[in-house]
Image (spheres, rainbow, N blue to C red):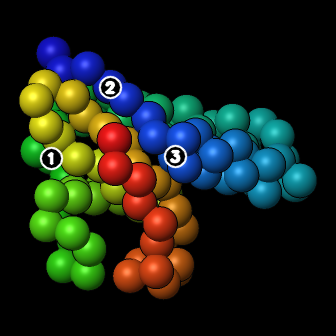
């Protein structure tokens, strides 16, 4: 099974998403993050599940989870999570890290 790696930005994204939702409901915030982690674990088993996104680099793939987009790349047996952002963000302006 491929290894999993999170970029610094994706870890910050998760913290920010949890904090934003937790203002209203810490329980719901934890549930949303739990769904993200379930989707990401699915990627480990099926790394080509996501689709390529026409607005971003060709090597990136994208998976939708609860209105958020999980951007990742799969290379050399590693699933690298680059960003996790709300679908309403201006996608071409996203800062994506090279892992």
Residue denoted by label 1: 49
Q: Quadrant of residue 55?
A: bottom left
Separation of marks 3 and 1 at Cα, in angstroms = 19 Å
Residue 94 pos. (x, y %): 46, 72
Disc 2, SS: strand
Instruction: Say whether disc 1 or disc 2 marks the residue closer to the N-terminus.
Output: 2
The N terminus - image quarter: top left
Asked if one can make out residue 10 in the rendered structure from this viewpoint, the answer is yes
Disc 1, SS: loop
Residue 10 circle label? 3
Q: Report the residue at 82% width, 40% height from top.
A: 26
13 w.r.t. 2: above or below = below
Q: Report the residue at 78% width, 57% height from top.
A: 20
Separation of marks 2 and 3 at Cα, in angstroms = 12 Å
Front in this rendered view, residue 31 or 36: 36
10 w.r.t. 53: above or below = above
Q: Quadrant of residue 45?
A: top left
Residue denoted by label 2: 4
Q: Report the residue at 70% width, 43% height from top.
A: 15
Separation of marks 1 and 2 at Cα, in angstroms = 15 Å
10 Å crowding of disc 2: few (<14), some (14-19), many (20+): some
Residue 17 pos. (x, y %): 67, 53
**In the displayed structure image, the side of residue 22 where residue 18 appears, left or right:** left
Residue 60 pos. (x, y %): 22, 58
């Amino acid at each position: 099974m491929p290894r999993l790696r999170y970029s610094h930005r994706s870890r910050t994204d998760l913290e920010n998403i949890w904090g934003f939702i937790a203002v209203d409901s810490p329980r719901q915030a934890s549930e949303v993050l739990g769904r993200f982690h379930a989707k990401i674990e699915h990627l480990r088993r099926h790394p080509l599940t996501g689709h390529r996104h026409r607005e971003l680099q060709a090597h990136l793939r994208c998976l939708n989870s609860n209105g958020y987009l999980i951007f990742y790349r799969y290379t050399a047996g590693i699933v690298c999570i680059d960003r996790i952002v709300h679908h309403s963000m201006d996608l071409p302006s996203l800062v994506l890290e090279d892992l």
